[in-house]
Image (cartoon, grey):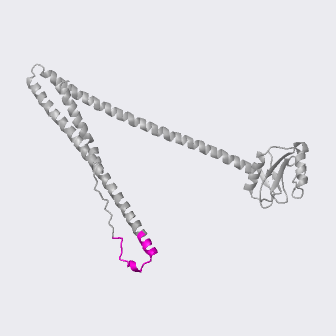
Amino acid sequence: MSNLKQLDQYKNEISTFLEKFDDINVFIQNATKPFDEKSPLFDCVFDDNDTDKMTIEEISQRNLKYDETINNKIISLESYFDKVQEAIVKRKYVFSFIEEQTTRLNEVLLKFQETSKSVEKDFQMLSEENDTAIYEIVKAKKKSKELKIQLLELQKAKHEEEFKAFANSWEEKLENNAVVQNEKMIKNKKEDETNNRITAYSNGVNLNKKVELFKEIEKHSKTTFNRVFNLYNTYNGNCTIINNKNGLKPSLFLFSNANNQYFGAFVTNGYKQCAKSFLFKIKDENVFSMTLKMD
């Protein structure tokens, strides 16, 4: 390696160290902050009680209290000494780090000085090669500028990629939010449609409860009209049929047992063969009948 190249290498090392100097300085300041922990101060735990007037049990209790107090003080001192030891170790590491960096910098500076002298000597000895040496210096400066330009381009590309990732992340969030809002709107629309399909003629039951009953009914399997008729005969008395003039208005029938706990229900359009029934369980409700608007 030529002296000029070595000189550039040492110069770059020194420049790199100087660029990192601020970070190193901050590290040293943080690691060598003043140790603010104060040593715990303790008063004497013993008093001048006259033991002649104390019972054995009182003396024993007093001694236990002394032991507990002393143990707590020992624990506090141990914690304090642990923190002191930690601060000492941290400072030793910082001092070692500073010494290592100083040694390295001194070595580089020494080599830089030696190489500089060698380069000066070479320049003094140059004659015909003087122009070539100047050309190498100019070329090195040009190369340095090219490297700086490449570094700036890399930084620019990095920021562009970060911006694209950030923009894509927000676009994805907006798309996901739009999907969630659309699903919520569809859900609310379906619930509104269900509410609009139900008209109630029952006692003491609000619309929300009727919607729950209707949804619960829709979950159960369909049975025959005979099954419905048997349920009607079993729980007759609380069942009220609501029909229009032609007797073909679809209706939802609910009837309870004696304890008002088990409910049966069926939907009919007036023809036995088209009757559909359901059986489900509801607690603590008195629902007798509802009219269902059919599509």
The single residue placed furthest to the bottom in the displayed view is 53
Q: Is residue 146 left or right of residue 193?
A: left
- Magenta span of residues: 44-63
Residue 57 inside the magenta-drawn segment: yes
Q: Nearer the viewer, residue 101 or 180?
A: 101
Query: Which residue: 28% across, 46% down?
Result: 93
The single residue placed furthest to the top in the displayed view is 128
- Quadrant of the image occupied by residue 115: top left
Does residue 277 lie above or below 130 as drawn?
Answer: below
Q: Nearer the viewer, residue 237 or 168?
A: 237
Q: Position of residue 256 (x, y in %)?
A: 84, 56
| Image quadrant in which the C terminus is located | top right
Does residue 6 lie above or below 268 as drawn?
Answer: above
Q: Position of residue 117 (x, y in %)?
A: 11, 30
Does residue 283 lie above or below 64 as drawn?
Answer: above
Question: Does residue 237 appear in the picture of this structure?
Answer: yes
Q: Is residue 180 left or right of residue 266?
A: left
Q: Nearer the viewer, residue 236 or 77?
A: 77
Query: Which residue: 18% across, 36% down?
Result: 107
Q: Position of residue 156 (x, y in %)?
A: 36, 35
Query: Which residue: 20% across, 27% down?
Result: 5
Residue 97 inside the magenta-drawn segment: no
